[in-house]
Every structure is written in structure tokens, then in C-alpha cells.
Amino acid sequence: MNTPATDYRVAVLGPGGVGGFLAALLARGGSSVLVLAGDETARAIARSGLRLESARYGTFETTPRTATGLEHPVDACLITVKAMQLHEALDRVPAGKLGHGLVIPFLNGLEHVELLRDVYPPDRVVPATIRIETARVAPGVVRHTSPFAAVDIASTPGNRETVEEFAARLRDTGVDVRLREDEATMLWEKFALLAPMALLTTHERANAGVVRAKRRQDVLALIAEVAAVARADGVAIDEAGVLRLFDAVPESMETSMQRDQAAGRPLELDALGGALLRRAARGRVEVPLTRRLVEDLQARTSAARR
């Protein structure tokens, strides 16, 4: 499927590392992109444009429209804020202004989809995951540092046509895109890699290569704990496959939670570690390593605030 992107309307809520990356590529591809952000970020992008720096896609600038809130219907609204910003950020996308557009969240964790379906028509909320390493280095400036950019999007028979249209627009920009039919499996597969990597790189204050070398037993144990909780949730995780992916990421790869800790920003600890503990309690699964890491990071965060 190769559909011209002209007149396809996309809103991007949160032009950080992921949101800025997607907004820049879609705008360059011809979609009509509206970036939704706070006053300062919206003004910076309106003044200087949105710049993407990427070895894979090149360095370029685009000039998407900006606003602090959605006023007119769109074909798709990408939700790309951090998990702890989600509740407040949704005020920028009133359900009555969305029209019949898709709501496509690219958030870390397991619990955001249910929250979004309480706010928007459930069949319009289309979960997605992205495998990438990006960073917002300044308002309106995003650096893509991984050699890969892969997106999975879950669809149902009722929304498949509109989901396929968005997937085609994104695929035409050069992003690797797959459509999935089992959203729970899709979300758990992303979580099974991300949660161990984020918790351990943040706990160790080091990149993936250091964690693989110094914390190998913890990597294995944490993947096993996530897989056990997923099984209790009805999803089978290939632990060996997750480990292969962990071992395949570049040694220098850092997680966004690790970078947030280094910069003194709030952590997505509840969306990752907290969500896993809640699912474990519900499934009566023991996860001692996860609990220790979460408690250590909570204590570290509390100490940093004092």
C-alpha cells in the first residue's frame, strides 16, 4: 500500500524524543502535522521549526503547525507524552474536538490503553509500540541515535482500514511498520524487553553494555519475572527471544528512564516497575528482584528531592 500523504491530518501530543521524531518524518512525507505542546515548546517550534538529526533519515527541518490544544478534527492523534504526564496532557485533546480520528498511544507500560478508552471512543484507541532510541536535546530538536526505528500497531476488524491508512503514511517515511492483531501480546512483548532494560540501566546508572556485563544474572532473573507475570495475564513470552533482543541492542544504548534520572527529571518508574508489581499482585506472582529495584529507585528519587 503506497498512498500519498497529502491532506492526511496528524496531531502529535508531546513533541519529545518519540513525538518529535514521528512528527518530523510525517511532516517531511507530506502529512499535515499539528504539534500540541505547552506554550514555550509550541512557540519554539513555531519560531524555528522542528529539527531531526538522524544517521538513518538524515538531518532536516520541518515546519509543522503548533497549538496548545486541539481545535479541529484530525485523522490520527499520536499520544507521545511520558506516562506520568498523560492525565494532564489529555486536556489538550478534548474528545469532542477529535472527530472520528484514531488515538494512537506510543507510551511505555501496560495501563495507559484502559485510561485512554475511558476518555475516547474505545474502538478509536489503537495501541502502538515503537522500538527506537531518541532524545529531545532542545525544544524542537530531536536526535535519533539508534540504527533502527520499528513500530507495531494493533488493529481490529472494525478499524483495520483506517489503521492501515495511517500505517501506510508512516511506512512511506521509511519507518518499519507491522500491523498486529493481539494488542495484549504486542504490549507485553515491548514491556518484557523495556522494563528489565529500563530498571537495570537506571539502577546501575549505566548503558546496556555495562548492564549486560555486570548484571547478567539480574537480566536473566528480571526477564523471568516479567515472563511469569505475563503468563498470569494470559500472554506467553519467549524469554530466550527477549534475551536475544537485549543482547542485540548497541552497547551504548541508554534508556529514557536512565537519562531522566541523570537529568533529575521525574521517572516513569510507576508505569514500568509499578505496573509490573500491580500485575504481579493480581496474578499472585512473586517478583522479588522487581520489588527490590523499584524500592531502591523510589528511595533514590526521594533522597534526590530532599
Image: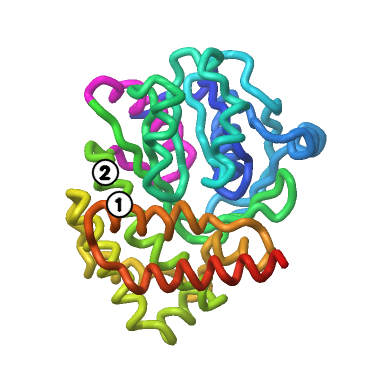
The label shown at residue 125 is none
Q: Is residue 111 magenta?
A: no
Q: Secondary structure at mark 1?
A: helix
Is 64 left or right of 8, judged from the image as shown? right
Q: Is residue 169 magenta?
A: yes
Quadrant of the rendered image containing residue 94: top right
The structure residue drawn at horizontal position 57% and vertical position 42%, both measured from the top left corner, is 81
Residue 252 drawn at (x, y percent): 53, 73
Q: Nearer the viewer, residue 167 or 261?
A: 261
The label shown at residue 184 is 2
Which residue is label 1 attached to?
A: 188
Q: Amino acid at mark 1?
A: Trp
Residue range (magenta):
157-179
- C-alpha gap between disc 2 and disc 1: 6 Å
* Position above or below: 224 against 99: below
Quadrant of the rendered image containing residue 101: top left
